[in-house]
Image (cartoon, rainbow, N blue to C red):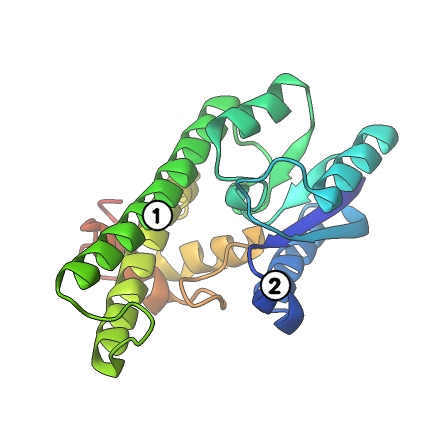
Amino acid sequence: MQCVGYIRVSTSKQGRSGLGLDAQQEAITRFSVVNGLVVTKFYRDVQSGVEDDRSGLNAAIAQAQREKCPLVVAKLDRLGRDVHFISGLMRHRVQFVVAELGLDVDSFTLHLWAALAEKERRMIADRTRQALLAKRDRGEPLGSPNIHEVAKAGVARLKAQADEHAFRTMPIIAEIRRAGVTTLSGIAAALNARGVRSARGGQWHPSTVRDCIHRSGKYSEGDGCHSC
């Protein structure tokens, strides 16, 4: 079965470097191979997901509808971080598949993940705004960041991203476990087969599955995942 791939990053710097684009394309390709799909073409945008009018996405949707095949993205937030926009695609019967979630995800789950993506976007914007206001109130110049503050903020950001990744991945791990896969090694293999990337963008291993579950507070010792 044929499909159309869509990848997106938000900044021109990421677009020029390929950061994120290559990883998304690799995830879609791997997912397609595992699930018997053939990607006929990839479309891309270097544009904010808040903007609905994206030339790459519009072209991808047009081809998918013309060929009556699904549009495949690595993660739902690559389509957008707005519940209304995602719901509009579903309402207009735009057939799309999220590699991270698998082929059989239902509309309720898609709405839930869209709401999470929108909430994440608002939280990022709020944290950025609050940090700038606090810095201004302390009388610090906004254009000359202190190197120690930057490093501290970077560590905090990485931790927040890892926690968010764990939160978003746990429903997938729970679904895999419900299918009868209960060992860390088995869950890692299932995540890799689905094209889900680890928190650092690489392959899953028993240790990374354990760390992910540990972040969610649902880990028990052993190679099993008995309380996911």
- The first of marks 1 and 2 along the sequence is 2
Q: Could you say which disc has been placed on residue 125 in the image? A: 1
Compared to residue 190, the image places residue 84 above or below, namely above
- What is the distance, in whole Å, between disc 1 and disc 2 at their CAs? 19 Å
> Which residue is found at the position 67% from the left and 59% from the top?
25
Q: Quadrant of the N terminus?
A: top right
Q: Quadrant of residue 66?
A: top right
Compared to residue 81, the image places residue 216 above or below, namely below
Name the residue nearer the viewer: 227 or 22: 22
Left-right relation of 73 to 77: right
Name the residue nearer the viewer: 123 or 219: 123
> Which residue is found at the position 45% from the left and 64% from the top?
204
The kind of secondary structure element at disc 1 is helix
- In the rendered image, residue 140, in percent from the top left (x then y), is placed at 19, 70
Q: Quadrant of residue 138?
A: bottom left
> Which residue is found at the position 35% from the left and 48% from the top?
125
Compared to residue 25, the image places residue 94 above or below, namely above
Left-right relation of 33 to 176: right
The answer to whether residue 223 is visible is no
> Which residue is found at the position 22% from the left and 75% from the top?
149
Compared to residue 202, the image places residue 172 above or below, namely above
Name the residue nearer the viewer: 92 or 32: 92
Residue carrying label 2 = 12
- What amino acid type is highlighted by mark number 2? Ser
The kind of secondary structure element at disc 2 is helix
- What amino acid type is highlighted by mark number 1? Ala
